[in-house]
């Protein structure tokens, strides 16, 4: 059975309306984030490096949280046809593998002369601590749309890393010791 998704067009969107998703961060999320973005920072990919860093363990890419926020906006509220125009976000705490985050978006304003809306974003971890806060701006759909949920077709090319993890870590020690 095909799941159908229906959006919330601008004229049906109201201030105070919310959408919420909960997700648990996995190593696969981090690996896909590195693949997608090209951000192969060892703070995300190397247990050895991350253990000695400021967070003492590997952390998720900020892209993972913004991607989930984009997913809510594009698939649920307002949903299909929404265009993400901008964001002003602050990362408050790191998200670690195994953390469960709750992403809550709340419509806080609607433009009077164009179909634009602003949403407050609050992402909390399993302890209720804010890991991301911000304000998002979107161009809302003006027509009611219903489509079947689609599954992405993925062909990925891994980012080329011409060195071993040990070589990378040794090189980073040299870089960090010379940067003041």
Image: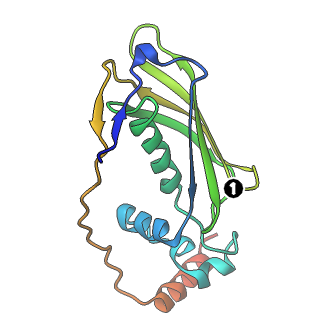
Counting the numbered discs, the total is 1
Image quadrant where one finds the C terminus: bottom right
Left or right of residue 157: residue 13: right
Left or right of residue 90: residue 168: left
Tell me if residue 180 comes above or below residue 116 in the rendering: below
* Residue at 29% in and 53% down: 151
Image coordinates of residue 115 in percent, x first then y, are 39, 16
Image coordinates of residue 171 in percent, x first then y, are 50, 85
Between 155 and 87, the one lying in front of the other is 155
Left or right of residue 173: residue 29: left
Instruction: State which quadrant residue 161 falls in.
Output: bottom left
Circle 1 packing at 10 Å, graded few (<14), some (14-19), many (20+), is some
Image coordinates of residue 139 in percent, x first then y, are 38, 25
Instruction: State which quadrant residue 46 falls in.
Output: bottom right
What secondary structure is marked by label 1?
loop
Q: Which colour scheme is used?
A: rainbow
Image coordinates of residue 167 in percent, x first then y, are 47, 90
* Residue at 47% in and 29% down: 137
Tell me if residue 101 comes above or below residue 52 in the rendering: above
Residue that lies at the very extreme toward the front in this rendered image: 1
Residue highlighted by disc 1? 93
Tell me if residue 62 comes above or below residue 136 in the rendering: below
Between 30 and 23, the one lying in front of the other is 23
* Residue at 59% in and 67% down: 59
Instruction: State which quadrant residue 116 falls in.
Output: top left
Left or right of residue 119: residue 34: left
Residue that lies at the very extreme toward the top in this rendered image: 113
Tell me if residue 169 comes above or below residue 132 in the rendering: below
């Amino acid at each position: 059975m095909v799941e159908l998704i229906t959006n919330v067009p601008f004229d049906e969107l109201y201030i105070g309306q919310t959408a919420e998703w909960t997700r648990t961060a996995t190593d696969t999320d981090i690996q896909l984030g590195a693949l997608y973005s090209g951000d192969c920072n060892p703070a995300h990919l190397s247990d050895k490096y991350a253990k000695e860093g400021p967070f003492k363990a590997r952390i998720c890419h900020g892209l993972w949280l913004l991607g989930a926020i984009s997913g809510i906006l594009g698939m649920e509220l307002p949903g299909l046809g929404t265009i993400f125009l901008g964001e002003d976000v602050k990362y408050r705490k790191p998200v670690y593998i195994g953390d469960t985050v709750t992403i809550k978006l709340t419509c806080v304003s609607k433009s009077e002369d164009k179909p634009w809306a602003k949403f407050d974003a609050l992402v909390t971890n399993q302890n209720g601590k804010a890991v991301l806060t911000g304000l998002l701006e979107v161009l809302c759909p003006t027509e009611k749309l219903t489509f079947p949920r689609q599954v992405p077709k993925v062909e990925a090319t891994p980012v080329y890393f011409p060195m071993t993890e040990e070589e990378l870590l040794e090189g980073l020690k040299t870089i960090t010791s010379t940067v003041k």
